[in-house]
Amino acid sequence: MNYSDYFSMLFVNYGIKLLYAILIWVIGKYIISKLMLLVDKKMELAQTEITLKKFLHSIINTLFFTFLFIIIVSTLGIQTASFIAVLGAASLAIGFALQGSLGNFAGGVLIILFKPYKIGDYIETSGVAGTVIEIQIFATLLNTVDNKRVVIPNGKLSNDTLINYSKNPVRRVDIVFGVGYNDDIEKAKSVLLEIANSQEKILKNQEAFVEVIEYGNSSVNIVYRVWCKTADYWDIYFQSMKMAKIEFDKANISIPYPQMDVHVEK
Protein backbone atom coordinates (compact mmCIF):
# COMPACT_ATOMS: atom_id res chain seq x y z
CA MET A 1 0.00 0.00 0.00
CA ASN A 2 1.45 3.35 -1.05
CA TYR A 3 1.13 6.62 0.86
CA SER A 4 -1.67 7.86 -1.38
CA ASP A 5 -3.82 4.84 -0.63
CA TYR A 6 -2.99 5.10 3.08
CA PHE A 7 -4.03 8.75 3.36
CA SER A 8 -7.14 8.06 1.30
CA MET A 9 -8.10 5.33 3.75
CA LEU A 10 -7.50 7.66 6.71
CA PHE A 11 -9.66 10.34 5.11
CA VAL A 12 -12.45 7.86 4.44
CA ASN A 13 -12.28 6.44 7.97
CA TYR A 14 -11.73 9.64 9.95
CA GLY A 15 -12.03 12.67 7.67
CA ILE A 16 -15.73 12.19 6.98
CA LYS A 17 -16.37 11.59 10.69
CA LEU A 18 -14.43 14.76 11.50
CA LEU A 19 -16.48 16.73 8.98
CA TYR A 20 -19.67 15.32 10.51
CA ALA A 21 -18.42 16.30 13.98
CA ILE A 22 -17.67 19.87 12.86
CA LEU A 23 -21.07 20.11 11.21
CA ILE A 24 -22.79 18.79 14.36
CA TRP A 25 -20.83 21.34 16.46
CA VAL A 26 -21.85 24.29 14.28
CA ILE A 27 -25.52 23.25 14.09
CA GLY A 28 -25.63 22.25 17.76
CA LYS A 29 -24.11 25.53 18.91
CA TYR A 30 -26.69 27.46 16.87
CA ILE A 31 -29.57 25.40 18.30
CA ILE A 32 -28.27 25.84 21.86
CA SER A 33 -28.06 29.63 21.41
CA LYS A 34 -31.71 29.70 20.26
CA LEU A 35 -32.78 27.43 23.13
CA MET A 36 -30.98 29.64 25.68
CA LEU A 37 -32.75 32.70 24.31
CA LEU A 38 -36.03 30.85 24.79
CA VAL A 39 -35.05 29.84 28.35
CA ASP A 40 -34.10 33.44 29.22
CA LYS A 41 -37.39 34.71 27.81
CA LYS A 42 -39.37 32.18 29.86
CA MET A 43 -37.52 33.23 33.04
CA GLU A 44 -38.20 36.90 32.29
CA LEU A 45 -41.91 36.16 31.85
CA ALA A 46 -41.85 34.28 35.15
CA GLN A 47 -40.11 37.32 36.75
CA THR A 48 -37.27 35.12 38.00
CA GLU A 49 -34.89 36.89 40.37
CA ILE A 50 -31.70 38.03 38.61
CA THR A 51 -29.38 35.88 40.78
CA LEU A 52 -31.41 32.72 40.18
CA LYS A 53 -31.74 33.60 36.51
CA LYS A 54 -27.96 33.81 36.02
CA PHE A 55 -27.43 30.59 37.94
CA LEU A 56 -30.04 28.61 35.97
CA HIS A 57 -28.74 30.04 32.68
CA SER A 58 -25.23 28.82 33.51
CA ILE A 59 -26.37 25.34 34.58
CA ILE A 60 -28.70 24.75 31.61
CA ASN A 61 -26.13 26.06 29.14
CA THR A 62 -23.49 23.71 30.59
CA LEU A 63 -25.85 20.72 30.35
CA PHE A 64 -26.67 21.49 26.71
CA PHE A 65 -23.01 21.72 25.73
CA THR A 66 -22.15 18.55 27.68
CA PHE A 67 -24.85 16.68 25.75
CA LEU A 68 -23.54 18.12 22.46
CA PHE A 69 -19.99 17.11 23.36
CA ILE A 70 -21.05 13.51 24.03
CA ILE A 71 -22.81 13.40 20.64
CA ILE A 72 -19.66 14.67 18.88
CA VAL A 73 -17.46 12.14 20.70
CA SER A 74 -19.83 9.35 19.66
CA THR A 75 -19.74 10.57 16.03
CA LEU A 76 -15.93 10.36 16.02
CA GLY A 77 -16.19 6.68 16.96
CA ILE A 78 -15.00 6.99 20.54
CA GLN A 79 -16.72 4.59 22.96
CA THR A 80 -19.03 6.84 24.99
CA ALA A 81 -19.29 4.34 27.85
CA SER A 82 -15.53 4.38 28.37
CA PHE A 83 -15.44 8.14 27.93
CA ILE A 84 -18.19 8.67 30.54
CA ALA A 85 -16.37 6.33 32.95
CA VAL A 86 -13.15 8.32 32.57
CA LEU A 87 -15.10 11.58 32.96
CA GLY A 88 -16.76 10.22 36.12
CA ALA A 89 -13.40 9.20 37.63
CA ALA A 90 -11.95 12.63 36.81
CA SER A 91 -14.97 14.34 38.35
CA LEU A 92 -14.55 12.28 41.54
CA ALA A 93 -10.86 13.23 41.80
CA ILE A 94 -11.67 16.89 41.21
CA GLY A 95 -14.47 16.66 43.79
CA PHE A 96 -12.07 15.47 46.50
CA ALA A 97 -9.61 18.23 45.60
CA LEU A 98 -12.27 20.93 45.69
CA GLN A 99 -14.38 19.90 48.71
CA GLY A 100 -14.43 23.41 50.14
CA SER A 101 -15.42 24.96 46.82
CA LEU A 102 -18.16 22.39 46.32
CA GLY A 103 -19.47 23.19 49.80
CA ASN A 104 -19.60 26.87 48.86
CA PHE A 105 -21.30 25.97 45.58
CA ALA A 106 -23.94 23.97 47.47
CA GLY A 107 -24.35 26.88 49.88
CA GLY A 108 -24.87 29.24 46.94
CA VAL A 109 -27.57 26.94 45.55
CA LEU A 110 -29.35 26.89 48.95
CA ILE A 111 -29.15 30.68 49.25
CA ILE A 112 -30.55 31.16 45.75
CA LEU A 113 -33.38 28.68 46.36
CA PHE A 114 -34.44 29.69 49.90
CA LYS A 115 -33.52 33.40 49.67
CA PRO A 116 -32.57 34.22 53.28
CA TYR A 117 -31.38 37.55 51.85
CA LYS A 118 -31.23 39.38 48.54
CA ILE A 119 -29.15 42.09 46.91
CA GLY A 120 -29.62 45.36 48.82
CA ASP A 121 -30.39 43.72 52.19
CA TYR A 122 -28.38 44.68 55.28
CA ILE A 123 -27.24 41.50 57.02
CA GLU A 124 -24.99 40.46 59.90
CA THR A 125 -23.17 37.15 60.30
CA SER A 126 -19.99 35.89 61.97
CA GLY A 127 -19.26 39.32 63.43
CA VAL A 128 -19.51 41.07 60.05
CA ALA A 129 -22.33 43.37 58.93
CA GLY A 130 -22.98 45.08 55.63
CA THR A 131 -25.19 45.58 52.59
CA VAL A 132 -25.36 42.71 50.10
CA ILE A 133 -23.81 43.89 46.81
CA GLU A 134 -23.65 40.64 44.89
CA ILE A 135 -24.59 36.99 45.39
CA GLN A 136 -22.18 34.78 43.48
CA ILE A 137 -22.21 31.00 43.20
CA PHE A 138 -19.30 30.56 45.63
CA ALA A 139 -19.43 33.72 47.75
CA THR A 140 -21.52 36.73 48.77
CA LEU A 141 -20.10 40.26 48.58
CA LEU A 142 -20.94 42.85 51.26
CA ASN A 143 -20.19 46.54 51.62
CA THR A 144 -19.79 47.66 55.24
CA VAL A 145 -21.07 51.02 56.49
CA ASP A 146 -17.53 52.45 56.19
CA ASN A 147 -17.35 51.18 52.58
CA LYS A 148 -15.18 48.10 53.03
CA ARG A 149 -15.74 45.14 50.71
CA VAL A 150 -16.23 41.82 52.53
CA VAL A 151 -16.28 38.45 50.75
CA ILE A 152 -18.02 35.66 52.70
CA PRO A 153 -18.08 32.04 51.44
CA ASN A 154 -21.61 30.83 50.77
CA GLY A 155 -20.95 27.58 52.62
CA LYS A 156 -20.40 29.55 55.83
CA LEU A 157 -23.46 31.74 55.25
CA SER A 158 -25.74 28.76 54.61
CA ASN A 159 -24.64 27.02 57.84
CA ASP A 160 -24.15 29.92 60.25
CA THR A 161 -26.56 32.17 62.14
CA LEU A 162 -27.55 35.16 60.02
CA ILE A 163 -29.47 38.33 60.90
CA ASN A 164 -31.30 40.07 58.06
CA TYR A 165 -32.20 43.60 59.16
CA SER A 166 -33.99 44.39 55.88
CA LYS A 167 -36.20 41.30 55.56
CA ASN A 168 -39.24 42.70 57.37
CA PRO A 169 -40.81 46.00 56.26
CA VAL A 170 -41.25 47.27 59.84
CA ARG A 171 -38.79 47.42 62.78
CA ARG A 172 -38.93 48.47 66.40
CA VAL A 173 -36.58 51.14 67.75
CA ASP A 174 -35.47 50.40 71.33
CA ILE A 175 -33.66 53.09 73.33
CA VAL A 176 -33.00 53.18 77.08
CA PHE A 177 -32.87 56.64 78.70
CA GLY A 178 -31.57 57.17 82.21
CA VAL A 179 -33.01 59.90 84.49
CA GLY A 180 -32.03 60.95 88.00
CA TYR A 181 -33.51 59.31 91.10
CA ASN A 182 -34.74 62.74 92.26
CA ASP A 183 -36.55 63.49 88.97
CA ASP A 184 -40.27 63.08 88.32
CA ILE A 185 -40.58 59.70 86.54
CA GLU A 186 -44.07 60.37 85.17
CA LYS A 187 -42.93 63.70 83.76
CA ALA A 188 -39.96 62.00 82.05
CA LYS A 189 -42.30 59.37 80.56
CA SER A 190 -44.64 62.10 79.33
CA VAL A 191 -41.76 63.91 77.60
CA LEU A 192 -40.70 60.72 75.82
CA LEU A 193 -44.26 60.01 74.68
CA GLU A 194 -44.51 63.53 73.25
CA ILE A 195 -41.26 62.92 71.35
CA ALA A 196 -42.70 59.70 69.91
CA ASN A 197 -45.96 61.38 68.89
CA SER A 198 -44.22 64.38 67.30
CA GLN A 199 -42.25 62.39 64.70
CA GLU A 200 -44.12 61.73 61.47
CA LYS A 201 -42.03 58.71 60.49
CA ILE A 202 -42.99 56.82 63.64
CA LEU A 203 -45.92 54.51 62.89
CA LYS A 204 -49.03 55.57 64.75
CA ASN A 205 -50.86 52.24 64.31
CA GLN A 206 -48.40 50.77 66.82
CA GLU A 207 -48.62 52.36 70.26
CA ALA A 208 -45.38 53.75 71.67
CA PHE A 209 -44.18 51.96 74.80
CA VAL A 210 -42.45 54.01 77.53
CA GLU A 211 -41.90 52.40 80.95
CA VAL A 212 -39.34 52.05 83.74
CA ILE A 213 -37.19 49.02 82.95
CA GLU A 214 -34.63 48.97 85.78
CA TYR A 215 -32.96 50.84 88.63
CA GLY A 216 -29.36 51.46 87.64
CA ASN A 217 -26.37 52.41 89.78
CA SER A 218 -26.87 56.12 89.16
CA SER A 219 -30.16 56.39 87.23
CA VAL A 220 -33.68 55.14 86.78
CA ASN A 221 -33.72 53.62 83.30
CA ILE A 222 -36.75 54.11 81.07
CA VAL A 223 -37.19 52.04 77.90
CA TYR A 224 -38.50 53.85 74.82
CA ARG A 225 -39.98 51.60 72.12
CA VAL A 226 -41.52 52.84 68.87
CA TRP A 227 -42.18 51.25 65.47
CA CYS A 228 -41.18 52.54 62.05
CA LYS A 229 -40.48 51.42 58.49
CA THR A 230 -37.16 49.58 58.23
CA ALA A 231 -35.74 52.25 55.92
CA ASP A 232 -36.46 54.95 58.57
CA TYR A 233 -34.85 53.09 61.51
CA TRP A 234 -31.69 55.16 61.92
CA ASP A 235 -33.47 58.46 61.25
CA ILE A 236 -35.86 57.72 64.11
CA TYR A 237 -33.08 56.52 66.39
CA PHE A 238 -30.85 59.58 65.99
CA GLN A 239 -33.75 62.06 66.03
CA SER A 240 -35.17 60.52 69.23
CA MET A 241 -31.76 60.65 70.93
CA LYS A 242 -31.30 64.32 70.04
CA MET A 243 -34.84 65.37 70.99
CA ALA A 244 -34.65 63.56 74.35
CA LYS A 245 -31.67 65.66 75.45
CA ILE A 246 -33.28 68.90 74.29
CA GLU A 247 -36.68 68.21 75.89
CA PHE A 248 -35.20 66.83 79.14
CA ASP A 249 -33.20 70.04 79.54
CA LYS A 250 -36.35 72.12 78.98
CA ALA A 251 -38.22 70.08 81.60
CA ASN A 252 -35.30 70.20 84.08
CA ILE A 253 -34.92 66.42 83.98
CA SER A 254 -31.36 65.32 84.57
CA ILE A 255 -29.48 62.65 82.61
CA PRO A 256 -27.08 61.16 85.19
CA TYR A 257 -23.56 60.05 84.43
CA PRO A 258 -21.24 57.92 86.55
CA GLN A 259 -19.75 59.85 89.46
CA MET A 260 -17.37 59.03 92.27
CA ASP A 261 -17.31 60.68 95.70
CA VAL A 262 -13.82 60.80 97.24
CA HIS A 263 -13.50 61.42 100.99
CA VAL A 264 -10.07 62.49 102.24
CA GLU A 265 -9.28 61.87 105.90
CA LYS A 266 -6.47 63.75 107.61
Image (cartoon, rainbow, N blue to C red):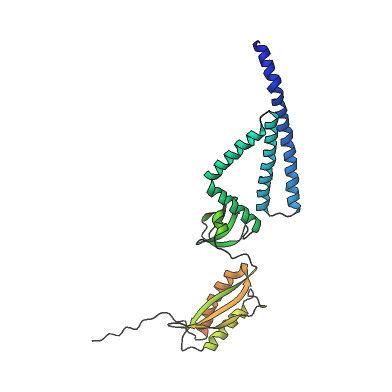
Q: Residue at the spot x=54%, y=88% of the render?
A: 187
Q: Can residue 138 be seen in this view?
A: no
Q: Position of residue 125 (x, y in %)?
A: 53, 61
- Which quarter of the picture shows residue 95? top right
- Tell me if residue 148 comes above or below residue 244 in the rendering: above
Residue plotted at (59% across, 70% down)? 233
- Find residue 5 and report its horizontal and vertical position in percent: 68, 13
* Residue 193 visible in this rendered orientation of the protein: yes
Quadrant in the picture for residue 231: bottom right
Q: Pick the residue in front: 228 or 57.
A: 57
Q: Where is residue 169 in the image (x, y as percent from the top left)?
A: 65, 68
Quadrant assignment for the N terminus: top right
Question: At 69% from the left edge and 38% from the top edge, which residue is drawn?
Answer: 67
Q: Which residue lies furthest to the left in this view?
A: 266
Residue lying furthest top = 2
Task: Write the residue at 60% across / 73% down.
Answer: 172
Q: Nearer the viewer, residue 77 or 220?
A: 77
Measured along the vertical axis of the image, is residue 184 above or below residue 30? below
Query: Split into 4 quadrants, where in the image is the C terminus?
Result: bottom left
219 or 93, nearer to the observer:
93
**Left or right: where 73 falls relative to 254:** right
